[in-house]
Image (cartoon, helix red, strand yellow):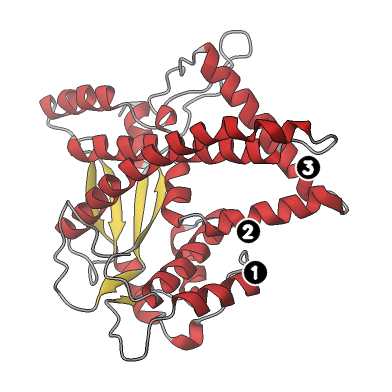
Amino acid sequence: MSSALQGLRKMRIIAIPLTRPTARKFPASDAKRTRLTYYQFALAAPRPNPPHPTTDSGDKDGDGNPVKKGRLEGIANWVMRKGIDTWAGFGKADGGWRLRTYQLGERIVDRLDFEELALKSIDPSLGPSIARLKLTRAMEEKRESLTVTIPIVFPPSLLSSSEVLSELRANTKHRIPRHRRGFYFWMLVAPLTAPFKLIPIIPNLPFFFCVWRSWSHYRAYRASQYLQSLLEHGIIVPEASDSLDEVYKLHPYSQSSLSTSTSMPLDTVNSRMHKSTFQPDQEPQHEVLLGRNAVPAILSTFELDSTAGADLYRAVEQARVRVSSGRDEL
């Protein structure tokens, strides 16, 4: 088996349903989401061999080939790394405006849609190439061998094979126009922050915020398009997981499992609850399926790291707040 196929075997998407409609008036379809689902993406194929220092020191794509990057993209990546290092330095400051800015920024991240943060983790340049996957699939079928697929793991007691694919399709269709608009909006707003450059000592934080939001939307937009291509070519296939099913059975959602996220301030959570709680006589349109108490079990079952844990905690909290709003569409 080729190195590309071996890498693909380690790829997966974990679909973790967070809510479901209380009535079956929301049939699963490719056009509209019927529930909130947290997707944990592992689509970056492992690099087969470290590059030789004298021949190639660049990134590899999902097939082990060098990623061709233009000059502008290289500059963008350099700026990105520089910004990340600078931001990390703000968090290590002893006090002052740098530390306060960092704390405010982390609160803003907690308010971003968990779907956007999950999509940003996908780098299409490091994932499998659609063109090469189609070629490899044709070659494998001629040899009557295994076809190239990426499994999407799901709990069979909550979703069927067709539903899990329909929900992912609907999610990508929902996110593509949203992130395309966000990308252009923040890019157009960025130049309006130029007057803030007149303030001495303190950097133009509004400008950097606009650029960061534009970049974030762009990453999510590209990732949504990439997922849509994988779905259209039949690369993503459902895979039922009894282990994930067991987590839902052992850790059902209850009000006693409700607590604040480790990364979300208490005052923020309380204010959201106060603003979004529906009236007692209003019947909720959706029900929450997962609480914080189930997160450690999911991390252990799929051997996920602490970063995935923080993202899942954030998704669980956001799902609860959206359901408490009483809206038909989440």
Which residue: 57% across, 75% down?
271
| SS at mark 3 in the image | helix
Residue 109, given in percent of the width and then of the height, sits at 58, 53
- Could you tell which of marks 1 and 2 lies nearer the N-terminus? 2
CA distance for labels 1 and 3: 21 Å
Left/right of residue 148 with respect to residue 326 in the rendered view: left
Mark sitting on residue 265: 1
Q: Nearer the viewer, mark 2 or mark 3?
A: 2
Residue named by callout 2: 107
Q: Nearer the viewer, residue 66 or 148?
A: 66
Q: Nearer the viewer, residue 200 or 326?
A: 200
CA distance for labels 1 and 2: 8 Å
The C terminus lies in quadrant: bottom left
Which residue: 49% across, 75% down?
275
- Could you tell which of marks 2 and 3 lies nearer the N-terminus? 3
Residue 209, given in percent of the width and then of the height, sits at 61, 41
In the image, residue 233 above or below residue 115: above
Task: Tell me the kind of residue under disc 2.
Answer: Arg
Pointer 1 with pointer 2, Cβ within 8 A:
yes
